[in-house]
Image (cartoon, rainbow, N blue to C red):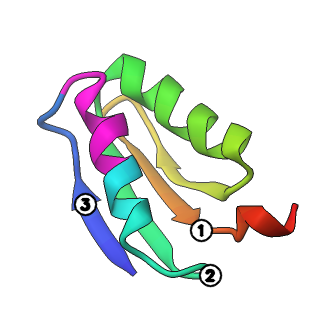
Amino acid sequence: MIFIDLTSFRCPIPLVKAKLALKSISVGDSLHILLSDPGSRRDVPAFFKNQGHQVMALQDDARQLSLLITKVDLSQR
């Protein structure tokens, strides 16, 4: 599992960094990311869900959103 704290970045940087990180892991592996920017909190989970990856919110409060994204083999869909 890779952990990335993206709370210091504003949209669209967190989405770009999360996409690059997901490319670097194997199918079945997970990315744990932290987000604080309102746009990123909305866009990042939506992007990965729309792509078909598994997205689970571990924490969602006023301060930050903690996501666990598990990479799925999209060629099997």
Residue 14: percent from the left, percent from the top? 29, 37
Marks 3, 1: nearer the viewer: 1
Q: CA distance from mark 2 to mark 1?
A: 5 Å
Q: Which residue is mark 2?
A: 28
| Mark 2 closeness class: few <14, some 14–19, many ≥20 residues within 10 Å | few
**Does the magenta portion include 8?**
no
| Mark 3 closeness class: few <14, some 14–19, many ≥20 residues within 10 Å | some
Answer yes or no: do the residues labelled 2 and 1 have beta carbons within 8 Å? Answer: yes
Amino acid beneath label 3? Ile
Whether residue 22 sits left or right of residue 2 in the image: it is: right
Whether residue 1 sits left or right of residue 14 in the image: it is: right
Extreme residue toward the front, this view: 75
Asked whether 34 or 73 is in front, the reply is 73
Q: CA distance from mark 2 to mark 3?
A: 17 Å
Q: Quick check: 77 above or below 46?
A: below
Quadrant location of the C terminus?
bottom right
Q: Which residues are magenta?
A: 10-18
Q: Which residue is mark 3?
A: 4
Marks 2, 3: nearer the viewer: 2
Q: Residue at x 64, y 54 (%)?
A: 55
Q: Which residue is mark 1?
A: 71
